[in-house]
Amino acid sequence: PPSRYRSDASFKTGGVNSLLFYLINTLQLCLTRIEDADAIWCGKEAARARSREMAGEGEGNTGGYVRVGGGMKYESRLVSGKAYTRLARRQQIANACGRWALRCLTSAGVGLAMYLAVDKGSKVSSRENGAHMAKAAGKMAGAYFLKSVAKRKYEVWRLRHRIEDSIQSISMWQQKWIIVSSITEVNDLRKTTSYSKLIAEPSAEDHNLEMKASSRRLLEALPIRSNKGAFWYSQGAFRLLLVRRVMDLVYASVGTSLSYTGPSGAYGLWMPLAGLCASYYAVAGSDVTSSDAARYVQAPDMGFIKRAWGMVTLPPIKWLSLEASRLLKGIELVERVVIGGTPCLLMSHSPQPVISAAIDRTRRQKSRNDLPEIAEEQGSEGINVDLKGIEEKDVIFHITGGGWFIHTTATDIPWLAEWSAVANAVVVVPEYDLLPSHHFPVALNQVTDMYVALASGEAARELGFRPRRIAVSGESAGGNLAAALIVKLCMDGIIDAEGVRVAKEKTRKEFEEEKAGGEEGESRPLDAKHRHPSSSEHFFRRMRSDTLTDRKAGVVTLPDCLLLSCPALNMTHSVSPSRIMGTGDPVLPSGLIQMISNQYVPEESGVSKEDPLCSPYFAPDDALRCFPNTLLWVSASDPLLDDAVDFNTRLRRVGVNSSIHAAQHMPHAFLGLSNAGFPEAERVQKSCQRFLLETFRERKEGGGE
C-alpha cells in the first residue's frame, strides 16, 4: 500500500541521510589528519603545495578537459601511482635530513650561547674556566637535542592515535551502513513473520561472493584491531582487551608457522616454530599482531583451526587440567565410559562407590568377553529395561563446544566440577566425533543415542545409576547440539511430543482457572517466594513431580531444563546487527564463523543450512513448544548474540519458560574464564548454578504444586 511504501521510504531516506552526513564529517576529519600527517612526514611546504594542487588552485591545478578527436577528455595533471609514491618518499627523506640538520645546528647554537654566557660570568682561571664552559655547553646542547627528539616522538604518537580514531570511526560507519542497508533491502523478507527479528532471512548473497555487497565483503576482511592505549579503560574492558591480545597472538603465531611448514605442520615442527613466532609478536606490537591475525582468520583452513584451538586438547594440557581439578576442586570420580556407542567422560565431585564398582564390573566382563546379554523388547512405550534396585542420580548432560573441531573438555572440567558440587549431580560429557572426518549429522546422532540410552535407563546397569533429573547444557557448538537434541527428540518421535503439547495446554488451562479462582476469592499479597509461576513453569514442575514416582523404565522423556551459553543456533550466513558489530570478536571472528558453518554442513552433502536439526533457529513451533525451562547466557558483543535473542523470542511466544541474559566485556564462549579471574564470568557461573540447583531441588522436594 502507498502508506507502507511511504513509511519504508521515509525510514530508508532518514537512515541513509543521517549516515551520509556522518560520513561527510568523518571524511573531512580524515582529510585534515591526512594533511597533518603530510606536514609532519614530508614538511609543511610540500604539504601546502600538495593541498593547493589537490584543490586546483593556481598554476598547479589538477587538470582539465582537452579535445581528443571529436570529443573532450579529462586529463589529470596530478602525479599518481608509483611516481607519486617516489615523490612523497623523496620529500620525506629530504624533510628528515633537513630536520636533523636543523636540530643539530640549533643544538650547537644553544650550546655556543651557553658557552659564551658562562665565559662572561666566570671568575676562575682560564684552564678551569674552559673545562667548565665546555661541560655546561655540552649539557645544554644535549638537553635541547633530547627535547627536540622527544617533541617529535610525541607529535608522531599523537598523530598515529588520531589516525587510529579516524579508522575506527570509518569502520563504525561501515558497520552501521550495512545494518541500515540490510534492514531496508530485506524489509519485505522480514515480513514473513508477524514479529520483529534481528537476523535477516537467508539469501543467495550470503553464500555467493560475487553477489555480496562490496561494503560487507570489505567489513569481513578488516583487520582485528587492538587499541593501544587502555589506561582509561574500565577493568572489564581492560580484561577483554587482554583476551583480544592473547587471541591475536595465538592466531598470528599459528598462522605464520603454518605458512612456513604447510598445512601438514611438518610432523609437529609447527609447534616450536609457533613459539618463536609468539616471541616475535609479543614485542612487535598490537598493530602488526592484529593485522597478521586478521589475514589468517579471514579465510582459514581446517588445519589452522585445529591447531589454533587444539592446544587445549593436547594430552599434557588435559592431564594438567584434570589433576588441578582433583586437587583444587575436589573431584572424586573421573571415568571414561561408553554410553550409547559413544565415549564420554563421567565426573562427580562427591565419592560414588556404587558407580565406580559398576564401571569396574562392566570392564571386567568385557575383558573376559562374557558380558551377559540383556533381553530388550521394543514396544510402544520404548525399551523394556528392569531398573529395580538401581540408585537414582541427578545428571548434568554437558555438550562441549569447539566448533566441531575440538572438545573443550580441558577448559570445562574446572567449572563443571563446581556445578557437580553445587547440584550434587553426576556430569556426563559426550566425546562426539569431530570435523573434518565427520560432518552433520554424525555428532547430533551420537549425542542423541547417548541421551536416549541414559534417559531410558538402557545404560543404567553398566553405569550403576539411573537419572532422576537430567539437565542438558552446551556452549557454542555444544549449545547448537543441545538445542538440536530437543528438536530431534520431538521431530523424530523419540518422545511423545503430542502428549507433551496436550499436557502443557491442559495444565495451562488449569493454571488459568486456578488463578482466576484465586482472584475472585480473598486477595493475598504475593512475595517472591509465593509468586504465581508462569503456566509453562507450572507445567514442568508438575510433570517433574509426576515422573518422580511414575517414571517408566525404557521410556525416553524430555530433559528437565536446558542451559545454553553463546549457542550457535543459525548456521546460515544471514546478516544481523550482532554479526556485523561483532565481526572482530577475539575468539570467533567472521571468517571462522563462515568456515565452520561450511565444514559442518558442506554444500556437497545436499543438506540445507536451514534444516532445523543443524540450525535449531529454524525449528517449527510445534517442536519449540516441547522445550523445557531454558536459560540462555550470551556475551553482549558476541557475533551470535542475535541467534540467541531471536530464539528466546520464539520460545517465549510459544509459551516456554525461557530467559536470556547478556554479560558485558566478555568474548564468545566465556564460561571457562570464570577460573581465570574474570568476575563477569564468575557471576554467570553463579547464575547457572542457581538455575541447576532450583531444577534439581524441585525434584528432590517432590510433591505436586
Image (spheres, rainbow, N blue to C red):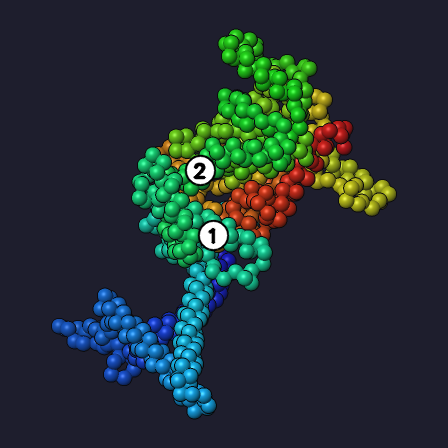
Q: What number of labels is visible? A: 2
Image location (x, y in percent) of residue 625: 60, 35
The image quadrant that residue 52 belongs to is bottom left
Can you say whether 196 is above or below 362 in the image?
A: below
Can you say whether 41 is above or below 530 in the image?
A: below
Q: Amino acid at mark 2?
A: Gly
The image quadrant that residue 326 belongs to is top right
The image quadrant that residue 35 belongs to is bottom left
Badge 2 is on which residue? 310
Most distant residue in the bottom direction: 120
Image location (x, y in percent) of residue 470: 63, 29
Res 486 visible:
no
Image quadrant occupied by the C terminus: top right
At label 1, counting other C-alpha atoms closer than 10 Å, the crowd grade (few under 14, some 14-19, many 20 or more) is many
Q: Taking 303 as reference, is 422 left or right?
A: right
Which type of secondary structure does the marked residue at label 2 adopt?
helix
Image location (x, y in percent) of residue 473: 58, 35
At label 2, counting other C-alpha atoms closer than 10 Å, the crowd grade (few under 14, some 14-19, many 20 or more) is some
In percent of the image, x 51 and y 40: which residue is there? 476
Q: Which mark is residue 245?
A: 1
Most distant residue in the left direction: 69
Can you say whether 25 is above or below 443 in the image?
A: below
Q: Earlier in the sequence, mark 2 or mark 1?
A: 1
Image location (x, y in percent) of residue 79: 24, 72
Foreground residue, 629 or 342?
A: 342
Which type of secondary structure does the marked residue at label 1 adopt?
helix
Can you say whether 531 is above or below 457 in the image?
A: below
Q: Amino acid at mark 1?
A: Arg
In percent of the image, x 42 and y 74: which residue is there? 146
